[in-house]
Amino acid sequence: MVSYFTLYKPLFTLELLIATQLYTCRLKRRPRFILRYALGALLCLGVSALPWQPGTPLEMAAAFLLLSVLIFAVQLLCYDVPANSLLFCMLAGYNTQHFAYCAGNVAQLTLNPLGSIYGLYTGQLLEAGDIPLTQYITYALVFFVTYLCYYIFFHLFGSRIRSGQTPMLRSRSLLWVSLLSVAVSVLVNAFVVFIPADGTLTMVINIYNAVCCLFILFMLFSLMDRRQMADELEKIHSLLEQSQQQYAQSRRNIELINIKCHDLKHQIRTIGEANRINESALREMSEAINIYDSAVETGNPALDTILTEKSLYCYKNHISLNCMADGALLNFMSEAEIYSLFGNALDNAARAVRHIEDVEHRVIGVSVCRVRQFVTIQVRNYFEDTLRFSESGLPFTTKQDQANHGLGLKSIRYIVEKYHGTLAVQPEGNIFNLNIMIPLAAQAEAASAA
């Protein structure tokens, strides 16, 4: 006679491998990942198939915990991320597997309240060798519910782990609570299997376990999201500090360029007056110098600096930068904020139009004006890529660095929301619109805060 435990161990191992993969599939992999994972999975399945029968609930719980530890060790050999990240995914995977297991049990008991939820694996059923059609339907429902749970949980939780991201349990207390909850869950399930109970009590226990698993998953990913938001905010503050340094350096460079251009123009006039070079060559030299002496003047030094800097970049890449801005409207913002906001917006726009073959579409428009009681900022440009938007309403980045994706737009939104403004990204056909509205009341608040 083949026992329930003997047959369920390999099934549990396979289900846990699949459930854990829902959360590790986007992590950084080690070389020869497929070979490593295949050998590791075969090792886990081989160990789970060993003919060993537990005599007590504690022995059964220990066996499942050891299988979980073995699967965790396989993950360490396959993924090039910190152990903390894999432990996070392992906890999420176990709670997903156990939720699906409990949901399958509840579904089976709902159809057959007087039946055994372990009917597929009992020795009696295997000895009889005669499985009714209704029982096949019940088993099919259980497997359907199990993998439907996997599908739903991947979209609810697994998809929130982006490529290149390393989710971690930074709190030691949360780590121990999560590990303890898994151990208790395994132990409770072992007692349910060993100690006979009526269908109603078994259903209540499974519903309770499923709720606990769902709570742990929500807690893990809520803390992950909070940690991610804190990390992004820290990066944005760091970017603003860098923007302040870059602004100061860029302003010094532009002032130096203007001085050199002024001196060159004076020398060219002197050469021209001495008739040492023909007029056509003098005109070409003057036009070339004017490109670097074309400082933008909007009424705000920080805006002038970033627009002048980006206009030189656009000229080099055959991009037309058109600007109509009343920079004085932005005087309530810090220099670093203006430099960062427009720098990120113009970098994104230039990246979008730089590779457009039609030169007439390599155009970026910038406007800063007052509309009623709002300061409005608009950056418009053509684009050819397909845009995909996140739940936050911001488009996903097209850069390779997915871990720090969209920090430019997030930095812009952070600055705008600081002054109670709104940021809207609105593609219209093949034109990308970045629209910002900041209430003029923010100027008074910023002035009083200063």
Image (tube, rainbow, N blue to C red):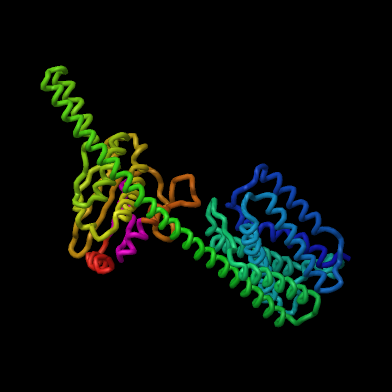
Identify which residue is drawn at 58% across, 52% down. 26
Question: Is residue 312 left or right of 266 when viewed as pictured?
Answer: right
The quadrant in which the C terminus is found is bottom left
Q: In this view, does 101 lie to the left or right of 270?
A: right
- For this orientation, the residue located farthest to the right is 1
Determine if the magenta segment contains residue 216: no
Q: In terms of image quadrants, where is residue 118?
A: bottom right
Q: For residue 185, what is the image quadrant?
A: bottom right
How many labels were placed on the picture?
Answer: 0
Range shown magenta: 412-436
- Observer-nearest residue: 302 or 174? 302
Residue nearest the observer in this picture, 107 or 276: 276
The location of residue 199, given as percent across then percent down, is 73, 80
Magenta run includes residue 432: yes
In the image, 81 versus 124, the foreground residue is 81
- In x, y percent, where is residue 25? 60, 53
| Residue occupying the point 63% across, 67% down | 175
Q: Is residue 87 above or below residue 360?
A: below
Up the image or down, 342 lies above or below 140; here it is: above
Q: Is residue 45 left or right of residue 241?
A: right
77 lies above or below 122: above
Residue 163: image x %, image y %? 54, 51
Residue 205, how many percent across, how many down? Answer: 69, 78
Quarter of the image for the N terminus: give it. bottom right
Residue for point 26% across, 50% down: 302
